[in-house]
Amino acid sequence: MNAVPQRPMTGIKILGLIAGGGSFPLQVARSARKLGYHVAAAAFVNETMSEMDSDADQTAWLNLGQLGKLIQFLHQVKAEKVVFAGPINKPRAFNLRPDFRAVKFLVNLRSRNDNALLSAVADELTNEGFDVVSAIDFVPDLISPEGLLTRRGPSSAEKADILFAWPLIKQVGKLDIGQCMVVKERAVIAVEAIEGTDETIMRAGRLSGNNLTVVKIFKPGQDRRIDLPALGLQTVKVMVRSRVTCLAFEAGSSLFFDKDKAVELADQHGITMLGIDPGNLEKIQDL
């Protein structure tokens, strides 16, 4: 599993895929191969799905913290472009055993929050001569749409909650803390930190019962090449269990997985979902 197959012939476009968890890296690998790329995936033990071995042309399995081996692999396969896809379990990342290259890298970091850490890794790869690009380039159909997705539009109370929460979560995002906030009757119930969106929603459900509104944004200053906000069918399942009635997300700057199934489930439970144009928040009053 750890062996790296022989490098492809000269002249083939080579994409280095830094593959986190979930199915997203698999989708990126498949799409890139259809576009004519030879996909060389750097996968992580206990994070990346095992299917990466078949969806990529070649795979190197690494442990979290092996930055030196990651860079060595990308040079070995002569990757031209590099893309990040899929999350890394953040609590588990604190238990990593960094190699010498990673230790030197971490010592110089001002912050180890999401955007600061991943942007610094991307910059490190850029300094090594790789062109770090956004995963959206390979799966544009996953970009979250603007407007009302569901049959039911937001109530006046839900609209008020969205307008209340939006500037607050933007300030939280500016501090590189989280991308998601749950509110009820213009009161903050839960703010995302290291636990992720699903856990934040479940915590809000435990704290405050029903009629909750979830607002998810793109952090100001966030690196668009990496760590895009993500929503999908799993998000809606968690919302149903947590008695959330409204989801507002920043359109065009996040990923939306299994959208049709997510919308169908939301409609079954009377949940409203809408993509917000951050430059024109007042448009939600017309929904």
Image: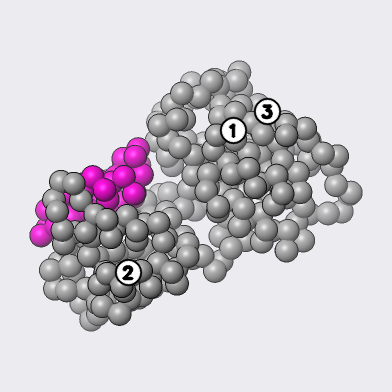
| Numbered label attached to residue 69 | 3
Find residue 214 and report its horizontal and vertical position in percent: 26, 58
Rendering quarter of residue 247:
bottom left
Secondary structure under the numbered disc 2 in the rendered image: helix
Between tags 3 and 2, which lies in front?
2
On the image, the x and y values in percent for residue 194 come to 35, 38
The amino acid beneath tag 2 is Ala
Against 235, is 41 above or below?
A: above
- Quick check: is 188 in the magenta stretch? yes
Q: Position of residue 116 (x, y in %)?
A: 44, 38
Horizontal and vertical percent position of residue 191: 24, 45
Q: Is residue 212 left or right of residue 268?
A: left
* Residue sitting nearer the eye, 223 or 201: 201
Nearer to us in this view, 44 or 11 = 44
Evaluate whether residue 273 shows in this view.
Answer: yes
User: Which quadrant holds the N terminus?
Assistant: top right
Q: Which residue is mark 1?
A: 45
Most distant residue in the right direction: 9
Specify start and end residues of the magenta stretch as a single range.
175-204
Q: Callout 2: 10 Å neighbours few (<14), some, many (20+)?
A: many
Determine whether 76 is above or below 65 in the image. Answer: below
Which quadrant of the rendered structure holds the C terminus?
bottom left
Compared to residue 160, the image places residue 45 above or below, namely above
Q: Label 2: which residue?
A: 266
Q: Secondary structure at mark 3?
A: helix
Q: Quadrant of residue 50?
A: top right
Q: Amino acid at mark 1?
A: Val
Looking at this view, is 148 or 112 the one in front? 148
- Dot 1 falls on a residue whose secondary structure is loop
Question: Which is more N-terminal, label 1 or label 2?
Answer: 1
